[in-house]
Amino acid sequence: MPFNAKSMKFNANINTVEIGTGDKAIKIGGENTFPFYTFDAPTVNAPKVGIEISDMGLANEPDCIKAVYAGCESVVDMAKKAVTFEGVDFLALKLEGGDPNGENKPTEELVELAKAVAEAVDAPLVIEGCKNVEKDAELLSKCAEALQGKNVLLMSSKEENYKSIGASAGLAYNQKVGAESSVDINLAKQLNVLLSQLGVNSQAVVMNVGSAAAGYGFEYVISTMDRIKAAALQQGDNTLQMPIITPVAGDAWGVKEASASEADVPEWGCVESRAIDMEVATAAAVLASASDAVILKHPVSVATISKMIKELA
C-alpha cells in the first residue's frame, strides 16, 4: 500500500509581530504550519534567539557568565558585548533589581538604564520586569513611555496588571505587549481576550505561556504549547494566534543540574557544560513545540540554538 503524506498546512496563520526598528528589526510568527514542517510550506519567519542580561550586572551570575563579560564595567557595556555574539537576534534586559522584596531599585533608575541600553545598541529590545505585579505595572509602563519610537516588547502583562501595561505599551506608546500566563491554554486565551477588549491590537501581542526547565514538569509546558498551536492553526482560533516567546534562561539556569558545584557532585562533570546543556535542551524542545522566539543566557547556547534553527528552518 503506498504511503500518502497528508499536508499539515493550514488556512489560518500565526500573527506576525515586528520588534525593533530599521535594518535590525525582527519579525516573529507568521507561520501556517507546525514548527519546522518545511516539507508542508516554506518557513515564513524563522524562530528568533535573544540573549538576556540583568540590571544587576554580574552580581548574581555564575562564574562562567562573569567570564563571558569580563572587562565590562557596566550593564551598558554588557549590552554592547551581548549583541555581538553569534546568533543573537535581540537583546532582553531583565529589570529584576526592581523587586520590592529584593533590591527594590527605584523605577526612575531602572527606566534610565533601559534608555541607556536602548541608545547603546541597535538590536531589537525586550524588557523583562521583576515579577512583582504591582512594581511591574509601574515599571513597564514607564519604560513604554521612555522608549517610545524604539518598538520594544514589554514583558510581561499579567491578568493582575494588564490594564496598566496594555494601556501604556499597547495603546499610548505603540510598543509590543507580552501577555504572560501560567501554563494553561484557557488562561492564555483569557488574557488575550482581556487585552483585546482593552483595545490592544492583537497584532501587537506576543504570548509567554510559561516555561520550565526540561525534566521539571516540562510535559505540562509542551502539552500547553501544542494545544495552543493546534487551536490557533487547526481550529482557526484568532484569540490564540499570537506568536509565543519563551524566556528559557531563568528556569534552565535555576535547577540543580545547572547550578550544583563540581565539588558537591563531581560525578556530574563541568557545571558550565551542564548549564549550557540544560538551556539548549529546553530551548530546542519549546521551539519544536510552539515557540517563535527564546531568551537564553550563555552565548554558546545562543550559537547552538541559532545553528539548529538554520538547519531546520
Image (tube, grey):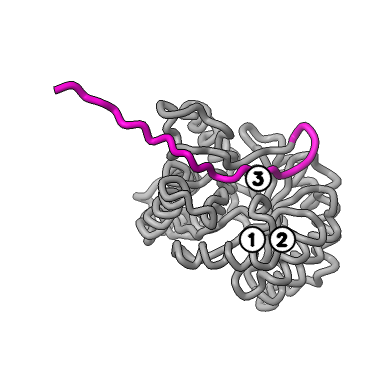
- Identify the magenta region: 1-24
* Res 17 label: 3
Locate the N terminus by quadrant.
top left
Q: Quadrant of residue 281?
A: top left
- Residue that numbered label 2 is attached to: 56
Residue 272 lies in magenta, yes or no?
no
In x, y percent, where is residue 152? Answer: 74, 50
Residue toward you, 221 or 116: 221
Q: Residue at x 47, y 39 (%)?
A: 11
Contact between labelled residues 2 and 1, with CB atoms less than 8 Å apart: yes
- Residue that numbered label 1 is attached to: 60
Compared to residue 41, the image places residue 299 above or below, namely below
Secondary structure of the residue carrying numbered label 1: loop
| Residue type of the residue flagged with mark 1 | Asn
Residue toward you, 312 or 199: 199
Tell me the CA gap for discs 3 and 1.
32 Å
Compared to residue 54, the image places residue 35 above or below, namely above
Confirm whether residue 257 shows in the render: no
In x, y percent, where is residue 266? Answer: 38, 51
Mark closer to the chain start, 3 or 1: 3
Contact between labelled residues 1 and 3, with CB atoms less than 8 Å apart: no
Q: Residue at x 68, y 42 (%)?
A: 90
Q: Count all numbered tags in the image, as a single digit.
A: 3
